[in-house]
Image: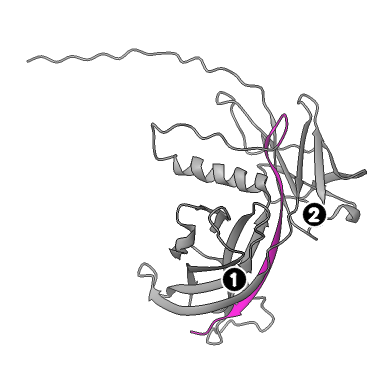
Amino acid sequence: MLLASCEKEVQLELEEKDSKLAILCNFTPDEPFNVELTKSTSLSTPTTTNSNLIEDAEIIICSGSYCAPAFPVPSLSDANSKYQPSDELIIPKVDTTYNITIKLDGFDPITAESTIPQPAEISHSSVGVITKYPIFEQDSIQGYDIRIAFQFLDNQNVENFYQVNFYQVLAENSNNATTDPDTVPRIVPNQGFSLIDNNLTGNFNLIDGGILFNDFTFEKSLQELVFEPVFQFDERIYKPTEIIIELRTVSAEYYNYYNSVYRQNGQASVPFSDPTIIHSNVENGLGIFAGYSKDIIKTDIVF
């Protein structure tokens, strides 16, 4: 039996798309706006470390009739540009609608709008079983799961969207010879979950270590949710002293954007899945401009 094969080189013609401005700006009460600005590029365009750097855009952020320009600020990243308003009167507030307009030569002006929703306050929290175990790849690295429950009131009169984040506070271990009494404790996010509340089954997505969910399945105002976040620490240097619970009440545009990002990331390993369109509230551009409020509570832990 004789087998033969041949190859034929095929030239694919990709449709060139005009480059668009893209922003990333999530803002919360009493913290300055931080606008990350970049631009899209086509697949055929070669990129360099700073090819997306934009330093000469005109950015205006408005609240009602009051507007303030935003200016570039130093950034550790060369991949994008960050802008902040210099006017303290434009610091975000709850229940206030903000608009952003960005102009740059060669691009269509882009605009977006968002409001910071009222925060849901954590009324109670508790810590249950802590399960500690070694991370075998590194002798001094310890992992632990910790059961955490908290309660909050969900406003049943409106649709609400939430994100919950967990952090551990690490203080330097007293047995560490290099301990500095003036060292500021480290705040480190969790590295996953061993339990997510059953009430959120089919109603959550994981995003940046936190859990994004809505209140569509909630049947009452008072909600109690239980989680088991997973943490790691180097016991030669640190010891966990507190757990921080951050409950964000996020705008619909925040929820829709990060929900679509999660779905797209989940499809990366499925070659024949339908493409996911990333939600954006930016007119004539890409990205997200979204407000959120937050409530934070700390709980002591003892090993």
Which of the labelled discs sits on residue 183, or is there none?
Answer: none
Residue drawn at point x = 52 percent, y = 46 percent: 262
Instruction: Please identify the quadrant where the N terminus is shown.
Output: top left
Mark 2 highlights which residue?
95
Where in the figure is residue 230, as x and y percent of width and height? 46, 67
Which of the labelled discs sits on residue 151, or is there none?
Answer: 1
Task: Give the magenta range.
Answer: 282-303
Where disc 2 sits, the SS reads: loop
Where in the figure is residue 295, as x and y percent of width and height? 68, 66
Where in the figure is residue 197, as x and y percent of width and height? 47, 64
Residue 60 showing in the rendered view? yes
- Relative height, residue 199 to residue 5 (above, below): below
The residue nearer to you, when weighing 253 against 24, is: 253
**Coloration of the structure image:** one colour
Callout 2: few (<14), some (14-19), or many (20+) C-alpha neighbours within 10 Å? some
Residue 104 lies in magenta, yes or no? no
Where in the figure is residue 126, as x and y percent of width and height? 55, 78
- Relative height, residue 14 to residue 275 (above, below): above
